[in-house]
Amino acid sequence: NALAEEMGVKFEFINTAWEGIIPSLLTGQVDMIMSSMTITEKRKKQVNFSDPYFNAGQIIAVKEGNDSIKSKEDLVGKTVGSQIGTTGALLVSQMEGVTGKEYNTIGDAFRDLKSGRIDAVVNDLLVSKECIEEIGGGVVLVGEPLSDEFYGIAVRKDDTELLDQLNQAIKAVKENGKYDEIYNKWVNK
């Protein structure tokens, strides 16, 4: 909303299944993707990204009271959930001795974690905090982030004017203090 205000437009938010998010952009159903999307080289082949607006490294979540998992090394022999098609799923798939279980939504993974059907979840830090709130607690984040991952806003390759407007708005929101205000409200709560 802060970016829309800076750009002098109104965004319409459309909830889209993750696996259909890039196709919805490429077919013109939406104008941009602003959904905790990590900037990756693979995704850059299909879309252009704005300047990064958030660093959200992957973090491990475990059921509250589980003291046996404190780091990546402790995941060996465990079943670890992630969301299909995300950088968390990629990271889990690269872990030796870890059984990955992919979910359509990350909320489903967190619910399975809370109920004890899996041992841990690997997911973006901020989204993980939100999921823990949504399921009513019972899950905690452990260890240090496993990666540095930057979120960007994806646009179609030929939509350079929109990309320029977004980058200008991101810069303005950071410079005028609005970004820090939003960050403190939602991340440092």
Image (cartoon, rainbow, N blue to C red):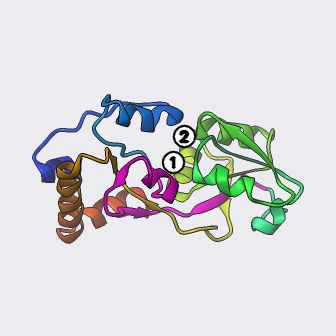
| Viewer-side residue, 132 vs 88 | 88
For the magenta stretch, what is the residue range?
37-65
Contact (Cβ within 8 Å) of mark 1 with mark 2: yes
- Residue 94 spot, x, y in % from top left: 74, 58
- Mark 2: give few (<14), some (14-19) or many (20+) Cα within 10 Å: few
Q: Is residue 67 above or below residue 28?
A: below
Q: Is residue 86 magenta?
A: no
* Residue 146 x/y as whole percent: 64, 67
Q: Is residue 67 visible?
A: no
- Taking the spot 36% from the left edge, 43% from the top edge, the residue there is 33
Amino acid type of the residue tagged 2 in the rendering: Glu
Q: Within 10 Å of the Cα at label 1, are there few (<14), some (14-19), or many (20+) other Cα atoms? A: few
Q: Nearer the viewer, residue 49 or 70?
A: 49
Residue 156 is situated, as x and y percent measured from the top left of the image, at 31, 44
9 or 96: nearer the eye?
A: 96
* SS at mark 1 in the image: helix
Type of amino acid under label 1:
Glu
In the rendered structure, the answer to whether residue 11 lies left or right of residue 19 reads left
- The quarter of the picture where residue 115 lies is top right
The residue to which callout 1 is attached is: 130
Residue at (72, 54) in percent of width and height: 92
> Residue placed at 31% from the left, 57% from the top?
50
Inspect the magenta stretch and tell me whether residue 49 lies in it.
yes
What residue is shown with label 2? 134
- What x and y, as percent, mark residue 81? 72, 45
